Image (cartoon, rainbow, N blue to C red):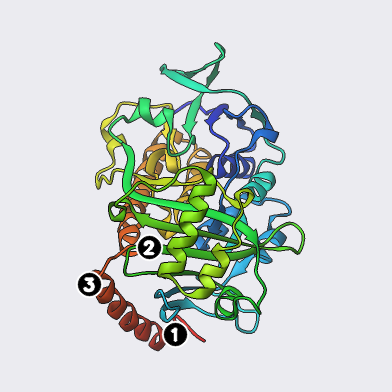
Amino acid sequence: MSSPIQTLAIIGGGIGGLNLAQALRRYNPSLRVTIYERIESREHKPQGWHLGINEWGLESLKEAQIDGLDSILEKNLVTGFIVYDEYLNELLRIGGPARDNELPKHATAIIHRTLLHNQLEKGLEIVYNKKFVKYEEHEDRVEVFFEDGTNVSADLLVGADGCWSLVRTQLAPGIVYSSVGVSNFGAVINAPTQEEIPTLYKALSFAMLRTSSPTGYSVLMGICQDEGDEKHMFFGLSWPDSIQSEPVPTEIEGTIHWAKQIVEENFHAEVALVFNKITAQDVILGGIRHVHTTNYQAVNPLKSIPHQRVTLLGDAAHAMTTNKGMGANTALKDSIDLAKALSQEDWRQALTEYEETMWKRGSAEVKDSLANTWRNHNIGLQFSIGKIFMRCLNAVFTWRNINHY
């Protein structure tokens, strides 16, 4: 039987790592957990995107028992997702307006990443300005080394350092993170009024939505409230790199002008109105971003790699494209499974089982998310075939009461 673990080092203070630390306060309260974060301080958090927390994520956050989180999530719940063509003709609907205060299975909380971070980090031991360099695994411990020349010893190391994970690079170099050939550009603005966007507003009052064009462009939209009552709209334009005959301007003002033109030429006037409100201050993540994913592997590669005191969680193991909205939710699911594994007497065996479950779930989402990315950017005939398929599927969903109006 394995000796009990007494110290745990988590590399990365993202959503998954923070929720793991919170869950361990419940499942293994005697375990000392320290999170090592590369940013200089709490005040240096990078600007983030809004997250859609679905059933997986909501259940995982509930299990971690985070004080004060329920009220934030509840006021930002949406109960549907709608897909439109470029003219805002509805193609597919999942869910619909909430009925009689009933919370449907597919309800999603839209929350800003920073707001969720602030709730999750309460009461945790987080050491900032610690840039991971490498680890050395020993029979009875793991040594973790940082760029500033310091090192720490722990019984177990968890790589929760995101899609560009250095822990993964050392542990499993066969897991490769690379571009898929799709780019996006996003912004957050004060939400337009109902009078300005009547068609969009009706949908956005209860749902997130996506509108796609046969030219390959696609727009995602949603509305959420901040800690007060002010409503914000987040939206993003994405496209396959292959449809660009000339380079897209990368300077912010140039990108904004280009995006406004593209949306005006390819989408409904209400969508164009939204994009026309963008200023340089509204742009998130520094402008154009290239979509990446880890490579799909059906068989868990960790099974063939000798290791006992190092494991991975979330994007560090299985980073996926954003087009299915499953990255944060999968990481949260991982965090609860790992917390439970580390509360077992035979934690080594439980860790092996966790990695198998984590990999099976994560790799499936990597595969499905990439398929969704290309479905959202179909061109020409493929787009037309996709419209027919979605309308047929929508009829089935209505018959099976998966959607409602």
Label 2 sits on residue: 217
The foreground one among 270 and 6 is: 270
Please report the residue visible at 73 percent of the width from the left and 54 percent of the height from the top: 68
Q: CA distance from mark 3 to mark 2?
A: 14 Å
Query: Can residue 182 be seen here?
Result: yes
Hey, what amino acid is under mark 2?
A: Tyr
Q: Earlier in the sequence, mark 2 or mark 1?
A: 2
Q: CA distance from mark 2 to mark 1?
A: 30 Å
Query: Can residue 59 be seen here?
Result: no
The foreground one among 141 and 157 is: 157
Q: Nearer the viewer, mark 1 or mark 3?
A: 3
Please report the residue visible at 37 percent of the width from the left and 52 percent of the height from the top: 361
Q: CA distance from mark 1 to mark 3?
A: 30 Å
Hey, what amino acid is under mark 3?
A: Leu
Dot 1 falls on a residue whose secondary structure is loop
Other residues around mark 2 within 10 Å, as few (<14) / some (14–19) / many (≥20): many
Q: Position of residue 321 (x, y in %)?
A: 39, 51
Q: Position of residue 276 (x, y in %)?
A: 57, 63
Query: In the shown orientation, is residue 297 left or right of residue 190?
Result: left
Label number found at residue 183: none
Q: Nearer the viewer, mark 2 or mark 1?
A: 2
Please report the residue visible at 25 percent of the width from the left and 47 percent of the height from the top: 298
